[in-house]
Amino acid sequence: MDNRTEYEMGLGSNFQTSVYLNLTQPSQVVGDAIATELAMSISNEWKYKMLDRIDDPIGIALYGEATLSSNEFELEPKLILDKQIDNFLIAVNGTAEIEYGLG
């Protein structure tokens, strides 16, 4: 089970950030019992809208998220392209995920 609690705030008309508290509880069957372990991490997300999908030919946004836990550091950069056409939204997300083990 994964839970994320988010606090989000705008820093201007095109810039926003969020802070997350992540709680993960993986479980596995061990013999006749189910073993669970609670893991906690924090994340910080930044998003900058360069072009608007309605006003410009295409919407473009830059996104980055960093996550830190007791045993891992993760970076997730993303390029978001989207276009609003009447009631339809077309979106493409180019994503990379970089993970570093700690300890």
Image: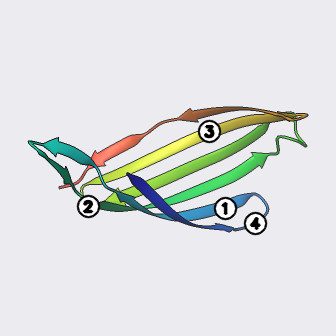
Q: Residue 10's quadrant in the figure?
A: bottom right
- Identify which residue is drawn at 25% across, 48% down: 27
- How many other residues sit within 10 Å of disc 4, few (<14), some (14-19) or many (≥20)? few
- How many angstroms separate mark 2 from mark 4 (CA)? 33 Å
Q: Position of residue 100 (x, y in %)?
A: 30, 47
Position above or below: 94 against 99: above
Q: Which residue carries the number 4 mark?
A: 12
Pointer 3 or 4: first along the chain: 4
- How many angstroms separate mark 3 from mark 4 (CA)? 20 Å
Q: Secondary structure at mark 2?
A: loop
Residue 42 in the figure: left or right of residue 60: left
Foreground: disc 2 or disc 4: 2
Q: Residue 84's quadrant in the figure?
A: top right
Position above or below: 41 against 81: below
Q: Secondary structure at mark 3?
A: strand
Q: Position of residue 78 (x, y in %)?
A: 57, 41
Position above or below: 87 against 7: above
Q: Residue 47's quadrant in the figure?
A: bottom right
Q: Position of residue 59 (x, y in %)?
A: 78, 39
- How many angstroms separate mark 2 from mark 3 (CA)? 28 Å
Please report contact status of discs 2 and 3: CB closer than 8 Å, yes or no: no
Q: Secondary structure at mark 1?
A: strand
Foreground: disc 2 or disc 3: 2
- Identify which residue is drawn at 31% across, 55% down: 25
Q: Amino acid at mark 2?
A: Ser
Q: Amino acid at mark 1?
A: Gln
- How many angstroms separate mark 1 from mark 3 (CA)? 15 Å
Q: Which residue carries the number 3 mark?
A: 79
Q: Which residue carries the number 2 mark?
A: 70
